[in-house]
């Protein structure tokens, strides 16, 4: 006898753990307006993230666009208590692939066809160019190396970390003022502020008293 295909029990367990990452198969959801920048956030390459497939916490190997968590919590933005999804019929691929008792499909496709900001915004978008500039100037992989040097007593590295934080803050003022981006959309365009995306930033800036004011969370 053939085994029955695994069926989602709609228990809400995965939804309470956070929203899914998006793949290129999810682009129609953006085209239809079901998803939009205000419902998304980016986890940047090098950002410390929880890997639900391999387990543990470590730097993201690629950029990941995912659904934002609900305000003040961890659960998916579209999760409705007790056990409902507001977009269940139009849920992203990762949600469709995931079954609690058979997670292999999600594991197999974890980094396959990941959706990026440029995929969503388009190659010619001025906002895509701004995101690229911000990414280059505040690169988290390079910043992590600078933090290690700063914590070892390198004053020049510490100043470079402080400069990256100032640049990040400037972009977060520029996009709403000049590009009409709302505060709610900033986590999609720029990701989380540097001190939240890379906890070592706080430690590096507190080292030696160079930058005593903690970056905003």
Image: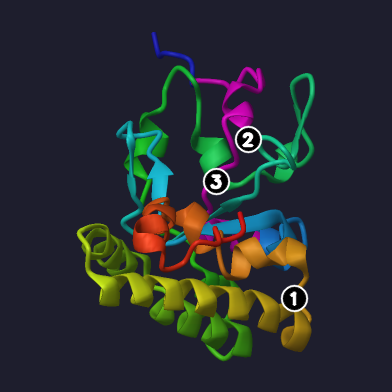
Q: Position of residue 1 (x, y in %)?
A: 39, 8
Q: Position of residue 146 (x, y in %)?
A: 27, 68
Write down the residue under mark 1. 181
- Gap in Å between the C-alphas at discs 1 and 3? 27 Å
- Gap in Å between the C-alphas at discs 3 and 2? 20 Å
- Gap in Å between the C-alphas at discs 2 and 1? 24 Å
Q: Position of residue 123 (x, y in %)?
A: 52, 86
Residue 215 visible somewhere in the drawing: yes
Answer with the quarter of the image where residue 117 lies.
bottom right
Answer with the quarter of the image where residue 204 lies.
bottom left
Write down the residue under mark 2. 74
For label 1, the crowd category at 10 Å Cα-Cα, with few meaning under 14, some 14 to 19 and many 20 or more, is some
For label 2, the crowd category at 10 Å Cα-Cα, with few meaning under 14, some 14 to 19 and many 20 or more, is some
Answer with the quarter of the image where residue 56 lies.
top left
Q: Earlier in the sequence, mark 2 or mark 1?
A: 2
Q: Is residue 193 left or right of residue 204?
A: right
Q: Nearer the viewer, mark 3 or mark 2?
A: 2
User: Tag on residue 93?
Assistant: 3
Q: Are marks 3 and 2 in contact (CB under 8 Å)?
A: no
Q: Is residue 65 left or right of residue 15?
A: left
Quadrant where the image shows the C terminus: bottom right
Q: Earlier in the sequence, mark 3 or mark 2?
A: 2
Q: Is residue 213 magenta?
A: no
SS type, badge 1: loop
Q: Position of residue 37 (x, y in %)?
A: 69, 64
Q: Main secondary structure of the magenta part?
A: loop
Residue at figure coordinates x 72%, y 38% from the top left = 72
Q: Which residues are magenta?
A: 6-28
Residue at figure coordinates x 62%, y 84% from the top left = 127
């Amino acid at each position: 006898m053939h085994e029955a295909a695994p069926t989602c029990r709609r228990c809400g367990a995965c939804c309470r753990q956070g929203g899914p990452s998006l793949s290129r198969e999810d682009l129609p959801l953006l085209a239809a307006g079901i998803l939009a920048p205000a419902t998304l956030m980016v986890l940047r390459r090098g950002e410390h993230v929880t890997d639900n497939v391999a387990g543990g916490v470590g730097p993201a190997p690629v950029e990941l666009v995912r659904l934002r968590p609900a305000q003040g919590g961890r659960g998916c933005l579209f999760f409705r208590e007790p056990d409902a999804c507001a977009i269940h019929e139009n849920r992203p691929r990762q949600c469709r692939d995931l079954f609690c008792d058979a997670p292999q499909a999600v594991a197999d496709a974890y980094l396959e066809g990941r959706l990026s900001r440029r995929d969503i915004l388009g190659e010619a978008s001025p906002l895509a160019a701004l995101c690229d500039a911000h990414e280059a100037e505040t690169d988290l992989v390079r910043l992590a190396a600078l933090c290690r040097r700063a914590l070892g007593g390198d004053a020049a590295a510490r100043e470079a970390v402080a400069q990256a934080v100032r640049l990040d803050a400037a972009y977060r003022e520029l996009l709403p003022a000049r590009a009409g981006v709302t505060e709610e959309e900033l986590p999609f365009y720029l990701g989380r502020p540097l001190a939240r995306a890379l906890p070592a930033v706080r430690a590096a800036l507190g080292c030696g008293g160079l930058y005593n004011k903690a970056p905003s969370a």
